Amino acid sequence: MDAGLKWPNDIYWQGRKLGGLLVEAREESAVPCRLVLGVGANFCFSGSQYRDIDQPWVDIANIKKPLISRHVFAAALISETLQLMSDMATMYNSGSEIVEEWRRHDHMSGKRARLILPARTVDGRIIGID
C-alpha cells in the first residue's frame, strides 16, 4: 500500500509524510453537531522550503508526473472529500466501523516507536489504535 495514515492525523505516501488532517467538533445540546474539517497536502516544495523539515516527506510534485495545477488538485480533493463524507454518513453505523477502516490504512502498525514523557522514555512497538 503506497498511502497510509499515522494516528492521529498524518497522511503518508511510501513512508514519507504527505500531509495531514484536522477535525474539530462543536457540539451543543440544542443544535446538530458541527464539524470543521481541514485537509493539508504538501503540493510542491522548492529549494529552501524543505531544509527545516525534520522527517521524511514527499510532495504531490514528486508523486504525480506531470504535475497537475494546484487548482485542479484542490478541486479533486474537495470533491473526493465530500463524496467520502457522504459515503460515511450511509455506510457506518457506529464508531467501531470507522476505527476498523483506519486500521486498514494504519501506516505505523508494527513499527518501533519511542514515547518521550517528562519523567521517562518508553520504547515499544505500535500495535494499532483503539
Image (cartoon, grey):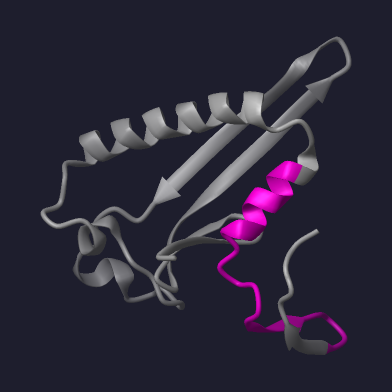
Provide residue 98's location: percent of width, then percent of height.
Answer: 69, 44
Q: Is residue 125 left or right of residue 47?
A: right
Provide residue 106's location: percent of width, then percent of height.
Answer: 60, 63
Q: How many marks?
A: 0
- In this view of the protein, which residue sits in the foreground, 48 or 54? 54
Q: Quadrant of the C terminus?
A: bottom right
Question: Which residues make up the magenta segment?
Answer: 97-120
Provide residue 128's location: percent of width, then percent of height.
Answer: 72, 67
Q: Residue at x 79, y 35 (%)?
A: 94
Q: Is residue 44 left or right of residue 57?
A: left
Please, which residue is most extreme toward the left here?
66
As drawn, 73 above or below 123: above
As drawn, 127 above or below 59: below
As drawn, 7 above or below 21: below
| Quarter-of-image position of residue 5 | bottom right
Q: Residue at x 39, y 71 (%)?
A: 14
